[in-house]
Amino acid sequence: MTDNYLKNLLTGGEPESRDGWIYMKIAGEPYQRGFQHGYYLASQIKDAIRVNRFLAKWDTGMEWDFFIEKANELFPRHIDDEFTQELQGIADGACANRFLTSFEEILTWNSYQELLGYWWPKYSNSQPHRFKNAHRCSAFIATGNTTKDGNIVMAHNCWDRYAASDHYNIILDICPANGYRLLFQAPPGYIASTMDWWITGARLVVAETTISGFSGFDSKGEPEFYRSRKACQYAQSIEDWKNRMWKNNNGGYAGSWLLGDIKTKEIARVETGLKYLGFEKKDDGYYSGYNVAADLRIRNRECSSNSYSDIRYNGARRLRFMELLDKEGIDVDIDKAKEIISDHGDVYLQKQDNPSSRTICGHLELDDAKYGSHAGQGPYYPWGAGDGKVVDSVMAENMSFQARWGHACGMPFDAKAFLQEHPQYTWLKGYMRDRSTRNWQTFGGL
């Protein structure tokens, strides 16, 4: 590769580190934007794959090469040329900057969540992977009389095992040659968010919380990471997004999607099962996400767990969102959204400040599991909310949002001290990072 050729590919600019986040602008044709991504984030991709290779074996007993083989049997035939080229560009860019990887590995990394969480249990004839029953994310979207100015406000935090979510600190700002501009959170090396926080040039805002206990998967369908990226890049409206996301659905990474159309002030909840599609829309009120399906068909016919009303589990967050958002005169704005997505109200123990597995800002590492098993994870498991994001209509019009790295509430996490106090998790030594108290930052802009 000549210096001139490399220079022509790297036109997007180097990434910017900001208070725990890495913000990167990418532009151009599919291969070019992939190459920029892979080249500048090569070290981050390398470390993310190192950690998740270990976690995959820990969770399944299978080697990473096994999942590379299976991902490349399942997914390439479903991915069109545009995104195949972008994935190839990521692999080639990383290789050009001293991380020797391949298209096959980058594809596996992009499909990691649905491969291990949805395909693997079916393939191995095992119980649903712990990933699928675990607490995942909290989110809400509001409009009309629920918000201060009648426009849309949305907030989200992403829950995961801290060793995994340490790598969810990339914010990609992509101007593709075709389709709408995208601003979204992602792990390094991903073409889709997967944390599922998006702002699109069509003035759509999109967030998602995973449906726990879901058991469907169809290898003949298109992978979720591919469908979500296409929907966000090309959809012009909520209905258009819904139809694109549902077409050729494989059931992977089933979720409750919260959408808002800044142009119309309408909000929606789109729930993607395998057999059933849930859809509701309104221009006044709110929807919340708490890892349980609202659609009765999905909840009862496609899920093995149902904690909708169980306030020891995910039902606690559903009730807490009701307590906070059903208040008369709530007038949600950006500051109020930050408070809500950082909330530690525990409805089961009736405590206003008790960070735990039951709170909107989740802290399983502080929970002794006396009142719940965390989907089988055990007491003090290092899992919870690893960030906070908020957006309103004004920000979305300007293709921007605000985000905080680390717990949305700002509580720090000391990995070394945690492992000393809870030595049952020393198997995570070397795979889990400290998280300090960070500030809210603004990303994007016209």
Image: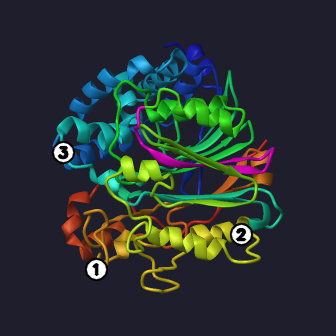
Side of 212 where 284 appears, left or right? right
Amino acid carrying label 1: it is: Lys
Look at label 3 and name its amino acid.
Answer: Ser
Q: Depth check: 343 or 221 in front?
A: 221
Q: Is residue 265 magenta?
A: yes
**Image mark for residue 335:** 2
* x, y percent for residue 90: 47, 27
| Residue appearing at x 41%, y 26% in the figure | 221
Which three-letter amino acid code belongs to the residue tagged 2? Asp
Residues in magenta, as a range: 250-267
Pointers 3 and 2 in contact (C-beta within 8 Å): no
Q: What element does badge 2 sit on? A: helix
* Residue 218, percent from left and from top: 35, 31
- Pinpoint residue 337: horizontal percent, then vertical percent: 67, 66
Specify whether residue 219 is painted magenta: no
For mark 3, what is the residue? 126
Q: Provide residue 207's location: percent of width, then percent of height.
A: 58, 49
Give the residue at x 75% y 41%: 203
Residue highlighted by disc 1: 370
397 vs 383: above or below: above
Image quadrant assignment for residue 334: bottom right
